Amino acid sequence: MVENRPWMTVLTHMVLVLGIALVAFPIWVAFVASTHTLQTLLNPPTPLLPGGEFFENYYRALTEGAKAVGAPVWSMMVNSLVMALGISLGKIVISLMAAFAIVYFRFRGRIFFFWLIFITLMLPVEVRILPTYKVVSDLGMLDTYPGLIIPLIASATATFLFRQFFMTVPDELVEAARVDGAGPLRFFKDILFPMSRTSIAALFVILFIYGWNQYLWPLLITTDESMYTMLIGINRMLAAGDSQAEWQVIMATTMLAMLPPVAVVVLMQKMFVRGMTETEK
């Protein structure tokens, strides 16, 4: 039962505004810091209103970067974008194929192979990082995009989610497609894939953010500054050694690093919600 009381509406809105303010305040401070000179940031009090160095700081971050890194932010954004797209699309394609084979093909050991895939949930990259690094190094994939992407594109979770969705598809639909002369590939392309598009969109949002936020694996296999991702670049900027960290450039880089994940979430918000709350059949 929903009670419509005015004071309750006011209270809930106040709590909502307070929560938004608590979450948004650090982001506002970072944005303000990205619009001032370094001297202004080093001298108290900390400014809480934007300054006049917005274009200079962002232009320098995008084209030159901080002195401690030596790579411009646009280069690191491209690396992070390629890595995030490669991981998310690779996970979705492999998981779709694996779930399709497990559900619609009858072969010996089908259930065994499914549980073998599922058990890999207990073996994330952090657990098998040394043998994975050895394999990637022996294959000559250090400081390359395949080295950043391939070890992370297998996903037991996505395979399990797609398998569960495919198992809810009525058998009558499969029989109708078979009677209509559709082979396995046509059934997958014309029927199963369109039915799965909201689930794929929801999974893409989650996996894109997962790939964008990867830190440990890129830190391990990248030594060339031209292959640094955004998180590696920000960490290198903070480790300035004896010299003064360039906080205005670091804050501008941090704000730029938030843009792609936010854009993906905003642009795919409707499909993400539909994919998480309903099933199309």
Image (spheres, grey):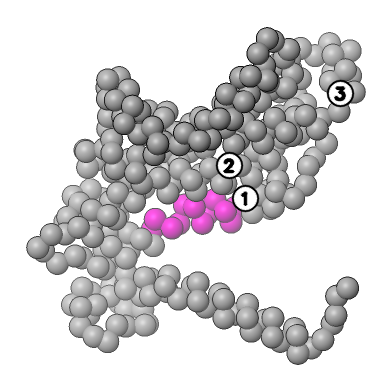
Q: Residues within 10 Å of mark 2 (few under 14, many from 20)?
A: many
- Mark 3 → mark 1, Cα distance in angstroms: 31 Å
Q: Amino acid at mark 1?
A: Met
First along the sequence among labels 3 and 2: 3
Image position, residue 74 (x, y; %): 32, 49
Quarter of the picture holding the N terminus: bottom right
Residue on which the image places disc 1: 268
Residue on which the image places disc 2: 204
Q: Judge from the rendering whether residue 153 lies leftward or rightward of residue 228; answer left or right.
A: right
Q: Main secondary structure of the magenta part?
A: helix
Determine the residue positioned at 89% across, 19% down.
176
Determine the residue positioned at 50% across, 76% down.
22
- Check contact, mark 2 vs mark 1: CB within 8 A: yes
**Figure check: 215 above or below 92:** below
- Mark 2 → mark 1, Cα distance in angstroms: 9 Å
Q: Amino acid at mark 3?
A: Asp
Determine the residue positioned at 34% across, 44% down.
216
Q: Amino acid at mark 2?
A: Phe
Per the image, is 22 magenta?
Answer: no
Residue on which the image places disc 3: 171
Highlighted magenta segment, given as a residue range: 256-267
Residue 179 occupies which quadrant of the picture?
A: top right
First along the sequence among labels 2 and 1: 2
Image position, residue 251 (x, y; %): 32, 65
Image position, residue 24 (x, y; %): 49, 73
- For mark 1, give the secondary structure: loop
First along the sequence among labels 3 and 1: 3
- Mark 3 → mark 2, Cα distance in angstroms: 27 Å
Residue 203 occupies which quadrant of the picture?
A: top right
Q: Residues within 10 Å of mark 1 (few under 14, many from 20)?
A: some
